Each structure stands twice: as C-alpha cells, then as structure tokens.
Amino acid sequence: MRDIAITLIIFGLLPVILSRPYVGILVWSWLGYMNPHRLAWGFSTTMPFAMMVALATFAAMIASKERHPLPWSRETVVLLILVLWMFMTTALSLYPWLAWPQWDKVWRIMLMTYVTLMLINDPQRVRLLIYVIALSIGFYGFKGGVFVLTGGSSNSVLGPTGSFIEDRNSLGLAMIMTVPLLYYMRAQMTHVWARIGLLVGIVLTLIAIVGTHSRGALLGLAAMMLFFLLKSRQKFAAILAMIPLALVLLYVMPEEWFQRMETIEHWEEDESASERVRAWHNAIDLAQHRFIGGGMRALVVWGGRDSHSIYFGMLGEHGWVGLGLFLLLLLLTWRSASWIIRNAKRQPELRWARDLAAMIQVSLIGYMVAGAFLGLQYFDMYYHLVVIVVMTKILVRRALEPDGPARAPPLGRRAPTLARGLDR
C-alpha cells in the first residue's frame, strides 16, 4: 500500500513540475532528505524517482518562458573549482573502482545544487525549500524522539536505509543541522497550532539526537545549542527548550548511554575513538604521500577504514588543495551570512532574511563540530545551505537598492522574530 501511495504522489507531482520547474527542486529535496520510498517494502524502494523528477525539472526549464540565469558569486565559483578538482582527483584516483561510483553520486548532488540556485530565486521559494528540508529530516527527529520516549532509549535511532543519513552518526548530524531550521520555520508561522506543533517537533528532534547514542552528535549538539544561546537575546527561551532534553537524560536514557558518553573524556581508552585518530593519521599520511590525495573512498583501502571526518576526508581524498577549497567555501558562506544579518537587521521587511542567515550559521556550527567526527563531506544539505545563503544575499542586495523589488510577502501577521540579537 505504501508503494502505491508514494508512486501515485510522485507521478502526480510530475505535471506540476513541468509547469513550475522550481517545484522539481522541492520534490527532489523531499526525496533526497526524507527518502519516502525507503519507508516502503516493495517495488518503490528501487524506483528511480529522483531521476524522474530531475529529468522533468530539466525539461520544464527548457520549455519555460522564465529566464533561469545562474547567479555567480564567490561561493559558486569556489564550489565549481572544488567540483572540477574532485573530478581530477577521481580521474587520477589510486583506486578508481571505488572512486567512480562515489563520483557518480557526488556530481549529481553538485549539478542539482546549481540548478537549485537557478530556480529558487525569490524569497517565497527560498522559504519553501527551507521548509521542505526541515520537515523532511524533522520527520525522523519526530519519529526518533517518540521512539526514545516510548522505551527505545536502549537502542539507537537510525535513518532511512540506503541514504546518506542511514547510520546513527550521520542522522545525528543531519538532525543537529535541522533544529535551527525548524526554529526559523516556527518564527515565520503565525498559526498558533503550527507554532506549537513545530515546538514539539523541535523538542522531539533534540531527544532523537541524544537517542542516536552518537558521541560526535552529542558534541555537535552542545556546540550548536551553545552558539544559539550566546548569540540570542532570548536566552531564557533557549534555556527552557533544553529542560525536556535534560529530563530525558536524567530519567529516560540508560546507564549504557552515560558510559558511552564518558569515553569522550577518556578517548584514548576507547577502541572506536582510537580508530578515528588512526584514520586521521592515515589521511595526513596519504596527503603527504600524494599531493592531490588518493581520490574518493581511497582511505578505505589506504588505511583500511573511513576518514570519520569531513576535514580529514577531504584531505585524504583530495589533498591539501581540496581541503583548502572546502574550508574556503565554508568561510565565504559564513561571511555572506554575516553580511546578510548586518545589512538586514534594521529592515523590518528583511527580517526573514536576517533570521534565516542567523539560523544557517547555527546549523553550520553543528556541521563543523559534529562533522569533525563524521565523513559527510559530500552531504547535500551542507551545499544546499551554501546556495541558500548565496541567493538570500542576492535578494537582500536587490531589496536594499533604491526602488528595489518587493520584499518577502508575510505569511499572515508578522510573528515574533526568533533571532533578535543575532548580529553576526
């Protein structure tokens, strides 16, 4: 039954995509993050839904009378250089039988990232994309939080099978990045029940992050919450949101969870943590041995284990140049988000952009910290946030010009801003 329902929904959306190309990005993102077809058990699990949606989107772009120029910026140029560098390191990989299958996944992510930049080109579309991403991963946060509270705390919360976020560590990182987006979404809503529902979803997602039993996710969660607390004037509200999480830690999580988290302090006594350190040394060794790195997935053979880090993963697979480009992209995105906050904070009509940029920065903090222990350097959510910042900056710049275009239409009455006081 699930297979039929999912298939009918996706096939029913194809005509909408053909008339409105940007809907294709929303559907493609829904498929990529929520993986609804992975929740079934029959024929839909192997259907190429993402390819169908992508082809329909390309066809709609070609047939559309609307122009879809690609806006170039510092970030998009650096990202293009990074993609070309990754292609070169793949072509010259030490282990091409591992590199090319991974490249086949990565180039599609990067292509749709640029298509996103071309089609998600007004405030309403930007917010719709944020909502799709937040709710898609938030679904697993809601589901995982309920699982923990109903007796599943001894087991790990897991993601959809066969996806980027299948294992507990990856799902934990994705949910950490999603919590600030759910906060942003709640700030934009005016309906009381919608705001209450999103608040419940946020609390359950925080509980689900703890329920992954991932030490890297716990560190990322702590950094993300601390950054939000430091930057927000609404510190009391942020502290209140942590109370349910503290209660779960005290009364729901088993003793095994606390024993596992204690190994963070004494990592040298834990075999899993020691393996991560050895993997990082392997990445440095490979980069020193070969300037361009070993190519995608090379560390699995070179050191016998995954990189377990976005930074050491880029270093081992793409060398010092690849790592430098990756860090430069992260820095430029952060600076652009700061520019948005600085220039939009005194404009009531641009409050949506200021709040969004602030929450994306909080998401990036979670990605940078939790990602230090997880090999998710190709996670499409990160690259989606990059292009969302790029487009938001363009929209803010246009709106600040004399006789600039209309600002984002409000979703009803203006809701209280979430990121008041987030000045950077």
Image: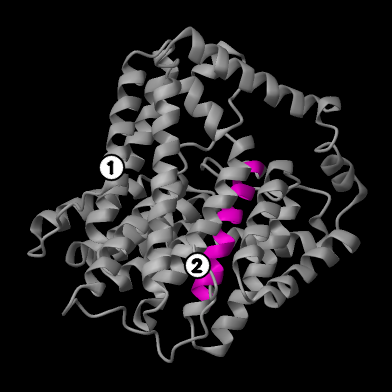
Which residue is nearer to you in this view: 227 or 198? 227
Residue 350: name its quadrant: bottom left
Side (left or right) of 12 relative to 68: right
Badge 2 density bin: few <14, some 14–19, many ≥20, Cα 10 Å? some
Residue 341: name its quadrant: bottom left
Which residue is rendered at x = 51% and y = 71% of the image?
184
Helix, strand or loop for disc 2: loop
* In magenta segment, residue 177: yes
Residue 1 percent location from the top left of the image: 50, 61
> At label 1, which amino acid type do we have?
Leu
Residue to which mark 2 is pinned: 423
Which residue is nearer to you in this view: 328 or 148? 328
* In magenta segment, residue 323: no
Residue to which mark 1 is pinned: 111
Residue 242: name its quadrant: bottom right
* Residue 84 to residue 390: above or below: above
Side (left or right) of 352 relative to 108: right
Q: Residue furthest top?
A: 289
Residue 162 percent location from the top left of the image: 53, 40
Badge 1 density bin: few <14, some 14–19, many ≥20, Cα 10 Å? few
Which residue is rendered at x = 56% and y = 64% of the image?
180
In front: label 1 or label 2:
2
Which residue is nearer to you in this view: 39 or 406? 406
Whichever of callouts 1 and 2 sits on the residue coming sooner in the sequence is 1
Q: Report the span colored magenta.
A: 169-186
